[in-house]
Image: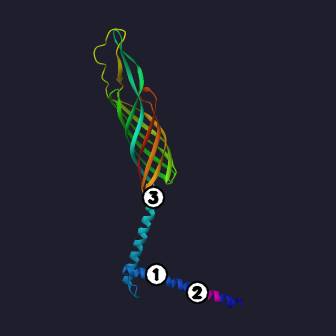
Amino acid sequence: MCASSHKIAADFWQLRCGALASHFAGRTFIVLSAWGVNMSPGSSSSRLSFLCKFFTIVLAISAFTAACEAQDKVELFGGYSYVHASVQVNQISCGSLCLLVLPPLTQHANLNGWNFSGQYKFLPFLGVVADFNGTYGTLDSVGTREHTFLFGPQISLPAKVSPFAHALFGAAKESQDPIPPPPGPCPLGPNPCSGFLSLGADRSFATALGAGIDVKLIPFVKLRLFQIDYVRTQLHGATQNQPRVSAGVVFHF
């Protein structure tokens, strides 16, 4: 009884496998016929054509898979940037008999410009960023410019709404145009004139701690809703703590 049961089961699986093989062969014949491959017996050219097309498809699938695996490895950001800058200037005062230069004074300027950064991700949540920023404005009616060149690690959440945070280190450069002196000669009397002198250009080490949020719009494109950085510099012998806000578009590959 057991032997007959085993024989029936074996015959069933043999018939089942044969049906599946016939079904697969039929589907393969239909696909290859659509490609124009002649699968008649003894046709070596048809087999060669089949092998060429088969390996072409394998290579295409491999390339597509590699591209998908590399997706989001590289991100490029570009957009608008605003800095509330702290700028050092010299004070001048005309006394009753001479021109006095007083200690530097910190003034504030609203600077507008651009922010560009590139990121390479070693892991889906961890990458390294190169961040470049330039902002421009006026202070005491003359031009003032700030540039930063920063690098460092960035962590992010790999999701449609992706918050991120980074710690960046590098260099800063600030330059001011010359400020015209107060008009006219120094008056004599109880109310002397006063004004400011530009300190020119300077460079210093810079750091930035920041965070922001990216939102995916379409494949390969995100919108950076905001990026807020706390930028610390040491220009003209003083320490500046400057907030910076940026927003723009992110392209990822």
Q: Nearer the viewer, residue 117 or 41?
A: 117
Residue 70 numbered mark, or none: 3
- In the picture, measured across the screen, residue 104 lies left or right of residue 16, that is left
Q: Name the residue under label 2.
A: 14
First along the sequence among labels 3 and 1: 1
Q: x, y percentage for residue 47?
A: 40, 81
Q: How far apart are marks 2 and 3 (CA)?
A: 44 Å
Check disc 2: other Cα within 10 Å, few if <14, some if 14-19, many if 20+.
Answer: few
Q: Residue 130: where, in percent of width, then height?
A: 42, 45
Residue type, label 2 = Gln
> What number is the disc on residue 27?
1
At a point 35% along the width and 35% down the height, the residue shown is 136
Q: Going by the image, does 1 lie left or right of 105?
A: right
- Tag 1: Cα neighbours inside 10 Å, few (<14), some, or many (≥20)? few
Tell me which amino acid carries mark 1: Arg
Query: How would you rate the neighbour count of disc 3 (Cα within 10 Å): few for under 14, some for 14-19, many for 20 or more?
Result: few
93 to the left or right of 227: left
Looking at the image, can residue 253 be seen?
A: no
> Where on the picture, by quarter, is residue 13?
bottom right
Where residue 105 appears, as percent x and y from the top left, is 42, 23
Instruction: Give the magenta part as a residue range.
Output: 8-14
Name the residue nearer the viewer: 178 or 183: 183
> Mark 2 falls on what kind of element?
helix
Query: At numbered mark 3, what does the secondary structure look like: helix, strand or loop?
Result: helix
Q: SS of the residue at dot 1?
A: helix
Identified at 44% across, 34% down, the residue is: 205
